[in-house]
Image (cartoon, helix red, strand yellow):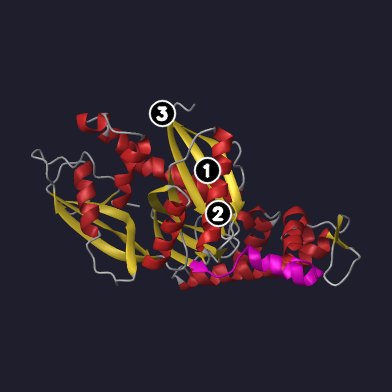
């Protein structure tokens, strides 16, 4: 039995679906369960087969449940993709308390006011990213709670997404037997553990290289300022290997994970491996250096596209804090060295500092839990101090309502 609050995240990716169980005791987060399954029914980050996606979610959740011995009922869902867009917004409210002290309720109302904006019928508002609060013309305030004022404003960005894609995602989760505790934007989730506060203030680019797509997120002055998704990822590397070695895709994926190197100069010509070839009954032997000769050009293309996209977003000057890589492809040996050469900037790979998930591919899943704790758990516990909430059910039930307010 667990003693703390249980928070569950779902990272539904192209190659893998991951369910991660976190336990919060006071201010300490422990990752107590991890489940994963192959991402059947998902292509380039989008659901193309409902039934297969539901089965993948069930397998991942059941795997995590067996590790911990508890039943998962609700989960926070990570969302990303080329349908996500940021739109500037502004909200204004009058401070409600008689003593003019700004509290949680005022912040909630001003963020709701920022969401009162016309969006096309096919789009859905996921949440708000505050850039700054303004109290009686005093700007650049990050948290106005406790301040005295009459007029509270917020400048930020509305996060919108495709209503169809969001509905299909939530439908899959619900058909898998889970309640949707809320949607969390992946770059915001990943930034909570992948980036430091100084990096986000000075300017940094978070590059999440997944199997089907690469998400480029620019953080500046402490907030997410630009977002873009490129239709290229680790699956393209796997396909190149399958063609180059003339083997099956599954074999190419296994070879990539076991022997792959992002740079030819870092790979060993002495490490050999055999692969079964299409149209032949005889396995052929290749070296790690030969494999790197296939991987490096595609990785160079990915980083070249990332650099051009960052420039297209308006960041033509040097990014002060450089680039941070996450995602499964970021686990490839020497990928940071190749990225530094191609991007001409400092590069590091983000790795969660939790036992059992010290792998860059877990950044999103663990980040969802961290982001939920930072933005909603404390609010939920504060709300639970009131008589009406002391008798409320579990943590998930108390926190659900907050996700209809923010991201």
Pointers 1 and 3 in contact (C-beta within 8 Å): no
Residue 20 numbered mark, or none: 1
Q: CA distance from mark 1 to mark 2?
A: 17 Å
Q: Which residues are magenta?
A: 229-248
Query: Which residue lies at the image location 61% right of the left edge and 42% below the top edge?
Result: 358
Choose mark 1 or mark 2, whichever is in front: 2
Q: Is residue 177 left or right of residue 325?
A: left
Q: Is residue 263 above or below residue 177?
A: below
Q: Residue 265: give x, y in percent of width and height.
A: 78, 61
Q: Residue 257: give x, y in percent of width and height.
A: 72, 55
Q: Residue 129: give x, y in percent of width and height.
A: 34, 56
Query: Which residue lies at the image location 51% right of the left edge and 48% below the top edge?
Result: 365
Of labels 2 and 3, earlier in sequence is 3
SS at badge 2 = helix
Of labels 1 and 2, earlier in sequence is 1
Q: Is residue 404 above or below residue 40?
A: above
Residue 55 numbered mark, or none: 2
Q: Which residue is mark 3?
A: 26
Query: Which residue lies at the image location 53% right of the left edge and 65% below the top edge?
Result: 49
């Amino acid at each position: 039995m667990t003693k703390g609050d249980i928070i569950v995240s779902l990272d539904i990716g192209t190659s893998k679906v991951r369910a991660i169980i976190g336990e919060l005791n006071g201010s300490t987060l422990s990752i107590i369960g991890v489940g994963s399954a192959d991402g059947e029914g998902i292509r380039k980050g989008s659901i193309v087969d409902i039934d297969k996606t539901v089965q993948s979610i069930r397998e991942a959740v059941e795997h995590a449940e067996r590790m911990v011995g508890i039943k998962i009922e609700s989960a926070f869902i990570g969302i990303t993709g080329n349908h996500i867009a940021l739109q500037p917004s502004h909200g204004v409210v009058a401070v409600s308390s008689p003593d003019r002290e700004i509290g949680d309720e005022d912040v909630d109302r001003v963020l709701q006011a920022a969401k009162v904006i016309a969006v096309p019928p096919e789009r859905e508002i996921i949440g708000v990213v505050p850039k700054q609060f303004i109290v009686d013309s005093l700007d650049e305030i990050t948290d106005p709670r406790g301040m005295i004022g009459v007029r509270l404003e917020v400048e930020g960005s509305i996060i919108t997404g495709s209503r169809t894609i969001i509905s299909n995602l939530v439908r899959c989760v619900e058909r898998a037997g889970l309640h949707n505790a809320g949607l969390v934007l992946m770059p915001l989730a990943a930034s909570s553990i992948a980036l430091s506060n100084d990096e986000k203030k000075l300017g940094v680019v978070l590059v999440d290289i997944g199997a089907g797509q690469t998400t480029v997120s620019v953080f500046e002055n402490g907030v997410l300022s630009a977002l873009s998704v490129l239709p290229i990822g680790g699956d393209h590397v796997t396909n190149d290997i399958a063609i180059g070695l003339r083997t099956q895709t599954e074999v190419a994926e296994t070879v990539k994970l076991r022997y792959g190197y992002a740079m030819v100069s870092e790979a060993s010509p002495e490490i050999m491996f055999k692969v079964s070839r299409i149209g032949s009954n005889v396995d052929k032997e290749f070296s790690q250096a030969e494999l790197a000769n296939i991987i490096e050009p595609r990785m160079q293309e990915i980083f070249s596209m990332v650099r051009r996209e960052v420039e297209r977003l308006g960041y033509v000057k040097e990014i002060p804090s450089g680039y941070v890589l996450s995602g499964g492809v970021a686990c490839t040996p020497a990928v940071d060295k190749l990225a530094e050469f191609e991007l001409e900037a400092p590069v590091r790979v983000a790795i969660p500092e939790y036992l059992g998930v010290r792998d860059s591919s877990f950044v999103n899943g663990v980040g969802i839990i961290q982001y939920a704790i930072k933005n909603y758990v404390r609010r939920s516990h504060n709300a639970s101090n009131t008589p009406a909430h002391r008798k409320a059910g579990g943590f998930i039930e108390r926190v659900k309502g907050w996700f209809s307010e923010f991201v």
